[in-house]
Image: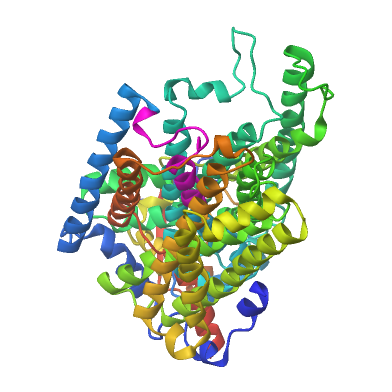
Amino acid sequence: MAHGTTNREKPRIYGLMAEFTSPEELLEAARRAFAAGFRKMDAYSPFPVDGLAEAIGFHRSRVPLIVLIGGILGCLGGFFLQYWVSVVDYPINVGGRPLNSWPSFIPVTFELTILVAALSAVFGVLALNGLPMPYHPVFNVERFELASRNRFFLCIEATDATFDLDGTRKFFEELSCQGIYEVDF
Amino acid sequence: MASNQQNQPAEAGDSLPIIEPGHTFGSITDKISSIVLTGRTPWFWYVGFGLSFILVLGLFFCIAAVITIGVGLFGIMIPVGWGFDIVNFVWWIGIGHAGTLISAILLLLRQKWRQSINRFAEAMTLFAVACAGLFPLIHLGRPWYFYWLVPYPSTMGIQPQFRSPLVWDVFAVSTYFTVSLLFWFLGLIPDLATLRDRARGRIPRFIYGMLAMGWRGSAIHWHRYEIAYLLLAGLATPLVVSVHTVVSFDFAVGLVPGWHSTIFPPYFVAGAIYSGFAMVLTIAIPLRKLYGLEDFITMRHLKNMGMVLLATGMIVAYGYLIETFMAWYSGDIFEKYMMMNRMFGPYGWMYWLLILFNILIPQALWFRSLHTNVIVLFLIAISVNIGMWLERYVIIVVSLHRDFMPSAWGMYSGTIFDYGIFVGTIGLFIALLFLFIRVLPMISIFEMRELVHEEEAKND
């Protein structure tokens, strides 16, 4: 096991983790940790907790922009797919109607807009979250399997500038947490 | 009408809880995940899956016969070129709509009661669309050429004709299936992580672990996740409306009397939601009983779904009324004849049965003593399922069998292969549902935890 180290170049552990029993306690702890100057940390909960991401200093998400770009690409791609097929590649004269009969291209354009936007939403969120990720140090904590059941965790990472094992442990002890665990790599 | 009834439930509905009191994060997690993680499969699972799988075997046989011998095995013959295949296609696609409606539209409307029914309703959507997708493929006659519908780099220099609504259908249905699958899977990821952490066997742990992709419930991940989920709901909402609209265009764009009508898109979408909610009720009522989930799928859910049935049923009734009125008001001899033939022609009995099953019987939902009675709700749901199938039969077959020229009139009836494939897809649908219930959580666990948290906050 790691012993108290202040060697920030090569931390021997991933971080220090505290366990809480309610989302309110976790939210409070996250706010206090941020106020105490910790920045490299993450909170873990079995369901989304309002304001938790903001409490640990995460404000802007790029998901909406990715979806917007996906939607625009799908829309243009859908329309020009039909335009290219009907006007350029294989023009068919159907009862003298114009080759670029755009109103009849709308349904496919619409469907492809939705399709590409939805694909970029799902794959965008997975990519931003770095999933799939087969291994992560937090899973080394035995109690962490309750993070998907009824327990709430806050992990301050050893790479944080203000992290030192004893000081962080003391910080956690002042909070109403259930347990404090060292997270091995 | 629909939104009114959803937003302002009757007084009795407000007092009914959306989750029975006394549940904690842990008890919810354990109860829902134990259905999947138990080593003992209940007897009714074997019975249900076994019986439905027999029907699936029948489906395989019929499909094999139709592919080897040809579509001559079906009852279709000019003038009725669209028979059971298209009736069943429209019926199944319609059923799928309720899943998306529950998961997307009710999410945007902040209807909390959706949370215990959205997961299996979404699964139902997927399986219904899968069943629907089979029919056009079989109907092609040479299904191995299905990819001709897709604009692929063809060496023959021939591309799909995008002015045809049938090509729109391909895009609409395949987009619908893909987006429904994504929506369902995104919702499943946190629950798969729960199963990964709760599973005791090595193999289930490995499989759920792979599927959960390392989800660890990080606050930043949840933040992005919730935004993406909401955006997907926003995308799925217009999509679900567009799918049955495009299906109705298949008819409305044609010149056949009874099809060529501008009311078709809204009338089809309302009918789709109607049949879909009927199917959700048909599945939810036995499920909650068999698995003892009355705490999560409460009377409130059943009653709310009954109200949606009533509202959409009235829209469908309005559609029938306007169709009849327009046939008379248009002064068009063919339209007028179509309506008379529909009511009093050789298939007239079907029309009146349809009115009975779809319009008259569901009126029982007006009465509180009836819409809070589980058995009555179940019977009404079955009645609507039958009624909506008859509606599609009446629209498709009865319109086609006598169009303009009396010399070109004919009669139609399904053959044993038509019925075999139809009943087979019902078996496929039920078999897939049973598999789903056995291996995946049928109720969204993390959303139920959220619900418990909100209920606690409300009580404090």
Q: In x, y percent, where is residue A2?
A: 39, 50
Q: In x, y percent, where is residue A158?
A: 52, 51
- In the displayed structure, B147 sits above or below B189; it is above
Res. A140 visible in picture: yes
Colour scheme = rainbow
Residue drawn at x 64%, y 83% is: B8
Residue drawn at x 59%, y 12% is: B154
Between B287 and B2, the one nearer to me in the picture: B2
Spot the residue most to the top.
B155
Q: Which span is picked out in magenta?
A: B72-93
- Please state, as top left, top right, bottom left or bottom right, where the N terminus of chain B lies in the image: bottom right
Tell me, yes or no, whether the highlighted magenta stretch contains residue B37: no
Q: How many marks are shown on the rendered structure?
A: 0
Res. B226 visible in picture: no
Between B443 and B142, the one nearer to me in the picture: B142
Residue drawn at x 59%, y 59% is: B104
Tell me, yes or no, whether the highlighted magenta stretch contains residue B88: yes
- In the displayed structure, B294 sits above or below A185; it is below
Q: In x, y percent, where is residue B444?
A: 43, 63
Left or right? Give the position of B251 relative to A155: right
- Please state, as top left, top right, bottom left or bottom right, where the C terminus of chain B lies in the image: bottom right
Between B114 and B248, the one nearer to me in the picture: B248
Spot the residue most to the front.
B407
Name the quadrant containing residue B206: top left
Between B2 and B221, the one nearer to me in the picture: B2
Q: In x, y percent, where is residue B233?
A: 62, 56
Name the quadrant containing residue B155: top right
